Image: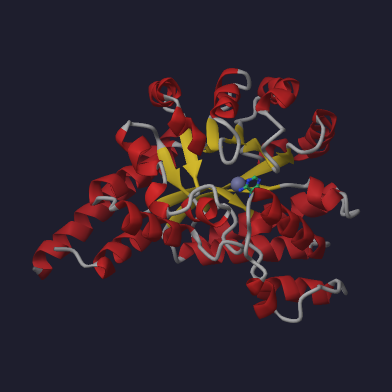
Amino acid sequence: MYTQEIINDFIIRIPKAELHMHLEGSIEPKMMFKLAERNKIKLRWESPEALREAYHFNNLQSFLDLLFEGCNVLRTEQDFYDVTEAYLNRVKLDGVRHAEAFIGPQSFLQNGVPIDVVMNGVIQALKDAEKTTGITTGFLISAHRHRTEAAAFELLELIMPWRDQLVGLGMGGAEVGNPPSKFQQYFKECHARGFNLTIHAGEEGPTEYVREAINLLGVDRIDHGNTAMRDPELLQQLSDKQIALTMCPVSNLLLNVITDLSEHPLRIMLQKNIPVTINSDDPSYFNAYVAENWIQSQMKLSLTFEEMIQLAKNSFQGSFLPLPRKAQYITEIENFCLDFFRRDIRAN
Ligand code: ADE
Ligand code: ZN
């Protein structure tokens, strides 16, 4: 009864939050060249098209190598501002009403970029774009798990002056061999300082890492969480505690976490009452912003309207927004659906 065109229109327009994206993973090839030119940095590709062609990955590490290389072009406050602004302007077109965005300052500090350049550039852009786009935002700092716990503690001290501008802290980077347990003291300290917490777990790493993230670190949500699928008890725990998973289907496909989107665990998890959400991770590198992740997932997993409405609600419920704001956005979803299906009845 519904054509794919109508389903896609529904997906693009339903109010949604994006909870798992890395600003450094949203630099489009054209922007990469613009920033490289501005900062007199020579890229090893001839053109934005050639750079886009290089976006083929075998696994997480091969992607991270390119991601960190790309971080080299960000040098000034204006650079961080431009990348953040471009992302928010783009996802406005995807029906995003709230975005929580990561940046990993360690990638820039190692190039000699001072922390205030990173923080002030992003924060100013988030503030300005909230006004121009109407999207509410949350800023998340991500520490690298392939570095030491001492390095994470150093980063924590560096960002404390911006504490009130942050919505939470996370952790990404090379997963296998760097379990959550490596950062137990760090997360304890972040928790003591009152931060909302999340960590990438169960993307390439084993089920055990998801269990550690919940039981040892006490995080509020999990980024990815795919390998929890292998453990029924853990699935029950995620459902009982209503711990949101910020899943990234196209990222998983392109990093060979799965071989086809039809294998993605998100639908089964949704059916088990786990608060799953759909996100883009690194939209430029995977050539898919959040709505495209929804569309491809819907097609390959045959997601129903009911399931998509649940996904949209989960995206706000799983956010770090205050409760009344979450409730407002959920009402927005309900009003959107009333209007969408009323129009649809009239049209038939
Ligand atoms: N940093 C950016 N994207 C990431 C991912 N998918 N996993 C781990 N770290 C990341
Ligand atoms: Zn990520």
Q: Residue 121 in the image: x percent, y percent?
A: 74, 57
Q: Can residue 14 be seen here? A: no
For the point 53% across and 66% down, which residue is it? Answer: 90
- Image quadrant holding the C terminus, namely bottom left
Can you tell which quarter of the image residue 171 is in?
Answer: top right
Horizontal placement of 338 versus 249: left or right? left
- Image quadrant holding the N terminus, namely bottom left
The one of 24 and 234 positioned closer to us in this rendering: 234
For the point 68% across and 78% down, which residue is it? Answer: 50
The one of 287 and 176 positioned closer to us in this rendering: 176
Q: Can residue 74 be seen here? A: yes
Is 64 placed above or below 158 here?
A: below
Q: Residue 293 in the image: x percent, y percent?
A: 44, 57
- Seen as rendered, the residue at the extreme right is 112
Can you tell which quarter of the image residue 25 is in?
Answer: bottom right
Q: Residue 301 in the image: x percent, y percent?
A: 32, 51
Horizontal placement of 333 versus 161: left or right? left
